């Protein structure tokens, strides 16, 4: 995780390398923008195109069909996608790419109709009707009303399991409730069933996914019940994203107590100022957030804590900003995603007065970033010299470095040829603000 603007760049979807493919086979290329929900949706899209007989390729110029699975959270997300659509039009004119589909959050937004016309997109789908892609790629039509029931990433070493979709909050700046709809929680048995299947198929790491996972509830059960049940079925578990108003002390304690839960908490705070938290309709005060963090630090002293922060929301004063800096210092985040406010059409904040000038936003952004990185660097330094058991998430690249994760949730670059999904023992040799660097000392399983 980094202390920079969050990903709107395409996320590489798998460890599969770009490369050879049968020139006679139908080919498809999937590009994913945005959050982990989108990564997960892309996994489902991948299953569909594979079932329809497409070979997956990594470059647009090798693809008959290109699927852009998009993010709409910030304005520049749309600009980036426009850049890709322009490039695809060129390839289409050269007779390379034949069809283009746009899915995900931009597909669910009003703006998609204009994009469809301008770029002659063949298919536009939102987040609730991804299953219609099946027909488009030549599969029998799927009748589906509840998206999370679609099969996920079976058999991969790391799998995302959606436990809820949508969001019942109405944060002033956020387009998610508009494009993803209200919260729908998936029944516990269905989640556990999927987790058990994945684990039986070799998955070693389950991430429970949703916009506000800790708001999950179903038939009298709450998120902590679900997390505990999953932690009994899976060898390694993490969850994201949470909302401070829903986060129960019980859950924070479970993170510390349960061996199979990664001790890493992502809890977006957005601002350290009560005044701004109110304008944003976040539903809590900074003091309540601080208390949650105290409970977490007590439950998992070695754990990692990350957050989301927005700078430059309309109305944010110097005093508000100072309070954010103070909160960042007090909470000593291990990492943070810092966002410059971006007005999203259809949200309340887009039409609020008192916009913050760009130069001020930029300065505040850098001040928060510096504060986060200082804290993170200091905390990471404390790990140097220690022995850790890490889970290999991605196997080594050409430079011989694999990416792993400690049980405390630290990202580690390690010199090893151990395969993804295995555990290795390492010694932490050095640390930067974002990652630890390690050498292998022994391998397990
Ligand atoms: N402008 C800037 N940041 C935003 N986020 C959501 N909407 C906006 C916006 N309009 C950030 C929030 C959220 C994260 C996923 O994206 O910090 O937690
Ligand atoms: Fe958006 Fe707020 Fe819901 Fe998070 S909790 S998805 S920021 S509306």
Image: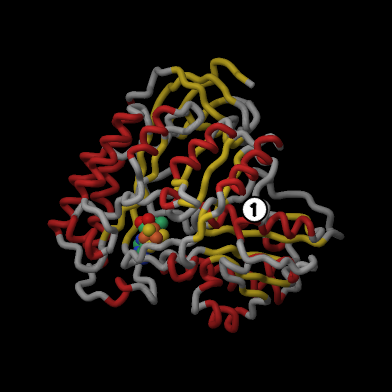
| The image quadrant in which ligand 2 is located | bottom left
Q: Is residue 445 left or right of residue 296?
A: right
Please tell me which residue is depicted at 37% across the width and 62% down the height of the picture.
169
Is 199 situated above or below 437?
Answer: below
Indicate the quadrant containing the N terminus: top left, top right, bottom left or bottom right: top left
Indicate the quadrant containing the C terminus: top left, top right, bottom left or bottom right: top right
Q: Position of residue 161 (x, y in %)?
A: 58, 47
Please tell me which residue is depicted at 70% across the width and 73% down the height of the picture.
92
Residue hosting label 1:
43
Is 161 situated above or below 409?
Answer: below
Residue ranking furthest to the right:
24
Please tell me which residue is depicted at 61% across the width and 49% down the height of the picture.
190
Q: Is residue 392 left or right of residue 131?
A: left
Q: Position of residue 275 (x, y in %)?
A: 17, 60
Q: Position of residue 43 (x, y in %)?
A: 64, 53
The residue nearer to you, when weighing 223 against 278, is 223
Residue ranking furthest to the left:
319
Is 124 situated above or below 60?
Answer: below
Q: Position of residue 147 (x, y in %)?
A: 61, 61
The residue nearer to you, when weighing 363 against 104, is 104
């Amino acid at each position: 995780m980094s202390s920079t603007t969050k990903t709107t760049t395409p996320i590489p979807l798998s460890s599969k390398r770009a490369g050879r493919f049968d020139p006679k086979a139908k080919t498809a290329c999937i590009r994913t923008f945005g959050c982990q929900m989108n990564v997960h949706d892309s996994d489902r899209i991948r299953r569909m195109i594979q079932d329809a007989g497409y070979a997956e390729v990594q470059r647009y110029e090798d693809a008959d069909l290109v699927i852009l699975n998009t993010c709409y959270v910030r304005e520049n997300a749309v600009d980036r996608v426009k850049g890709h659509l322009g490039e695809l039009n060129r390839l289409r004119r050269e007779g390379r790419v034949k069809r283009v589909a746009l899915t995900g959050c931009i597909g669910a937004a009003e703006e998609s109709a204009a994009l469809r016309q301008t770029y002659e997109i063949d298919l536009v789908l939102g987040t609730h009707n991804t299953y219609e892609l099946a027909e488009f790629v030549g599969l029998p039509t799927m009748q589906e009303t509840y998206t999370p029931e679609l099969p996920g990433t079976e058999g991969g070493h790391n799998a995302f399991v959606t436990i809820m979709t949508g969001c019942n909050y109405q944060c002033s700046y956020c387009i998610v409730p508009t494009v993803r709809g209200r919260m729908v929680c998936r029944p516990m048995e269905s989640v556990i069933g999927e987790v058990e299947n994945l684990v039986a198929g070799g998955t070693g790491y389950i991430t429970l996914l949703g916009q506000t996972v800790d708001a999950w509830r179903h038939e009298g059960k709450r998120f902590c019940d679900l997390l505990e049940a999953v932690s009994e079925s899976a060898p390694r578990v993490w969850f994201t994203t949470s909302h401070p108003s829903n986060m129960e002390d019980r859950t924070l304690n479970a993170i510390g107590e349960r061996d199979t839960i990664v001790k890493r908490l992502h809890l977006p705070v957005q601002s350290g100022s009560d005044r701004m938290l109110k304008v944003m309709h976040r539903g809590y005060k900074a003091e309540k957030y601080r208390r949650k963090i105290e409970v977490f630090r007590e439950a998992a002293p070695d754990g990692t804590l990350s957050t989301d922060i927005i700078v430059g929301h309309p109305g944010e004063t110097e005093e508000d900003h100072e309070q954010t800096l103070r909160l960042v210092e007090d909470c000593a985040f291990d990492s943070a995603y810092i966002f410059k406010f971006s007005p999203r059409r259809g949200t309340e904040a887009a039409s609020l007065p008192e916009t913050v000038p760009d130069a001020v936003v930029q300065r505040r952004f850098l001040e928060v970033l510096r504060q986060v990185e200082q804290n993170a660097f200091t905390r990471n330094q404390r790990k140097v010299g220690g022995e850790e058991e890490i889970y290999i998430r991605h196997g080594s690249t050409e430079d011989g470095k694999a990416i792993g994760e400690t049980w405390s949730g630290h990202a580690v670059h390690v010199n090893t040829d151990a395969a993804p999904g295995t555990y290795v023992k390492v010694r932490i040799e050095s640390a930067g603000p974002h990652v630890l660097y390690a050498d292998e000392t022994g391998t397990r399983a």
